[in-house]
Amino acid sequence: MSIPFELPTEDRALSPYTGYTRAHWEAVADGLLRAAWRWSTPGCALLDLPGRPSRSGVRSDGLEGFARTFLAAAFRVAGAGGDDPHGWLDRYARGLASGTRSPGGDDTESWPVILDHDVQGQPMVESASVALGLRLTAPWLWKHLDAGVRDRVEEWLRGALRHVPAPNNWYLFPYAVAGFLESVGRGDAETAAARERALELMEGWYRGDGWYADGDGRAFDHYNGWALHLYPVLDAHLSGDTGQAARYGDRLRTHLEGFALTFGADGAPLHYGRSLAYRFAASAAVGLGAVTGHTPLAPGVSRRLASGTLRHFLERGALTDDGLLSAGWYGPHEATLQSYSGPASPYWASKAFLALLAPAGHPLWTAVEEAAPVEEADRVLALPAPGLLVQATRGDGIVRLHNHGSDHVRPHEGESAAQDDPHYGRQAYSTRTGPTATANVADNHLSVEVGGRRSVRRRIHPLGAGHGDGWGWAASWHRPVFAGGPPMVPGLRVESVTVARGPYELRVHRVVGAPAGARLTQTGWATGPGEPLVSALHGLHGWHTGPETVRAPQGTAFAPWAELPRLTGDAGGTSLHVCVAALGGEPGPVAAEAVTEVTAGGAAVEVVWADGGGRTRISFEPVHVTHTVA
C-alpha cells in the first residue's frame, strides 16, 4: 500500500534489509505530525482526531492526541539538537498555554484535570508524555515559556502525583512527571515520594530474565518494552544517574537478548497482549538499548529490527489516506482494541522515535544493517520467568510464542469466563497470525466441554520451561472456566506441555478430574484465504476425530475471514491427549509426518521424531521433559 507522504530514497548499501535511514525516520515523524495537526483546536491544546471515542470521552481523547504526538515531536527535535524546521515546538508551546489556562473547563481548549485512575485517570497517562516531551525539549521550549505558563503546567502535572494510578505500569507516569519537575529545579518531597514508590513497585514486579510483570499478577507483554523498561532507563540516561542506569540498564540488556528474537523476518512484532494498536512502539526497547548502550545487539541489528517494524506497518495499511494511524493493526480492527482505546491512542507508537535520540553520527545510523535473529537460524528459546517459549524458523521468517505463564488476571480477581481475553488466554501467538475474536471459535485453544458448555483458560500457573540445541519446552496448568452456569467443575484441571522443534509444536495435555461424558477440542492456527501460510494439526493420542476445518467469520487482525483446524476427543477421570501443530509458509510443514512413534499411558508420553530428530519424553507428577538424539 502507498504511504500518504513522501519518503527519502532508499539506501540499500547502508540498509540492505529495509532501505531505511535516519532520514526516513525523521520523514515519518514529520508526516505523522503533519497529518495529526490538521485536527487541532484553534489554541492548539487538543488534537481531536476522527473516530470512535474512548470510554474516557472526547476531551480526554483530544488531550491524548496532543500528548502522544508531542512525544514524537520531542524525540524528533531533541535528536536533531533543537533543530525544528517545521516549527513543531511553537505549536506545542501554544497548546501548553491554552490547555492549562482553566483545566476542567468546557471551553474549546481546556485540558481535563487528573484524578484517580477509576474516576478520571486517562489524563494521568498523558501527563507522562507531556512531562517527557518537556524534559527532552527543555532548552528550546520550557525555558522560553512565560513564568505563569510554567507554573500552570506544573500545577496540572502535579495532579499525577496526588492521585492514585492503576495498579500496574501506571505508577511510572507520576514517576516520569516527577523526573521532569526535578530536572527543571522544581523537585520536592512530593516528587521524591512518587519516584520512590514507582521504583519500589518495580522491584516487586521484576521476575527475572529481563521481564517485569505489569502489576502484581502475571501479565507479560509489550508493556515490558514500551513502558516498564523505557521510563526508568531513559530517566537514568537523561539524568546521568550511573547507579540507576546500571541497575535498570542491565535488565534491559537481558530483556533484549530474548526479545530480539520475537520479530519476524518481515518486521512484524508478535500479535500478543493488549494495546496492539501502538504497533511499531514494539521497537522502543530496541531503540532505547541502542541509545543508552544497554543492549546485546550490534547497531546494525538494532536498526534492522526497528526500521523493519516501522516499514512493516507503513506498507500494510496502518495509515489512513489522510496519514493518520488507524485504530487497529494493519487497517482498522475492532477486536484489537480495548475500551480505553480512542482515535489518538495509536500515537503511543511515537515511542519508537526514541531511536532519533541517537544523533546522525551514532552507530545506530552509520553501521550497515545486519540480519535479524530470526534470519540467522532456526531457534527455540525458553523464558522461564514469564513462562514463555519462543520458536523462530529461518526459512519462512515466522516467530511463534507459546504462552504458559501470562494471563492478565490480577491476584485478587476471580476467574470469570466473561473476562476471557483472546490476547492472553490462547496457547500460542505469532508474527503472522492473530487470535480469533471472542464470539468465534478460539484458535490455539484446548477446550473442555461439560454439559454443553465449553471452557476458557484464564489464570495460568507455570510449571517450568527450558531449551536445548534446537528444541525447547514450556508447561503450565489451569482450571477450565465455564460460562452460563457454575464457573468451575470441582477437581477439574488441565496440565499442558508444549515442545517446539523446528516448525513443529508437540502439544500434550493431561486432563485430570473430568466428569463422565466430558469432551475436548483442540484447535490450531487461524489463517485467512489467500495467505501464503499453512496451518496443520495432527492427532497422535486421545483424539478420535479430526482434524476438521472450522470457520472464524470475524477473522483476525491479519485476515478479514479465517479458518482453523480442530481435533475432538473424549475425557473422563484422568486422560492424556497428544497432537502436533504447525504454522509455516507454503508449501508448509506436514504435521502428520513429524512424529514416527508415540507411546502414551499413565502419566507419561514419549515420541520419536522423524528424520532422526531424536526422542522426547514428557512425564507428569511433576512435569519433566527430556529430549535425546541418538
Image (cartoon, rainbow, N blue to C red):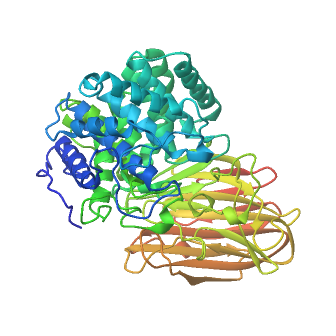
Whether residue 610 is visible, yes or no, is yes
Q: Is residue 571 left or right of residue 289?
A: right
Q: Position of residue 277 (x, y in %)?
A: 43, 57
Q: Is residue 11 left or right of residue 47?
A: left
Q: How many marks?
A: 0
Quarter location, residue 414:
bottom right
Point 44% across, 28% down: residue:
233
Point 76% across, 46% down: residue:
412
Point 45% across, 21% down: residue:
245
Q: Give the farthest residue toward the left.
A: 9
Q: Position of residue 307 (x, y in %)?
A: 28, 48
Q: Which quarter shows the N terminus?
A: bottom left
Whether residue 257 is visible, yes or no, is no
Q: Is residue 410 above or below residue 187?
A: below
Q: Position of residue 194 (x, y in %)?
A: 56, 25
Which residue occupies the foreground of this view, 330 or 55? 55
Point 78% across, 81% down: residue:
452
Which residue occupies the foreground of this view, 86 or 521? 86
Q: Is residue 537 above or below residue 127?
A: below
Q: Position of residue 35 (x, y in %)?
A: 24, 55
Q: Is residue 574 left or right of residue 365?
A: right
Which residue occupies the foreground of this view, 561 or 323? 323
Q: Which quarter shows the C terminus?
A: bottom right
Q: Is residue 45 above or below residue 186?
A: below
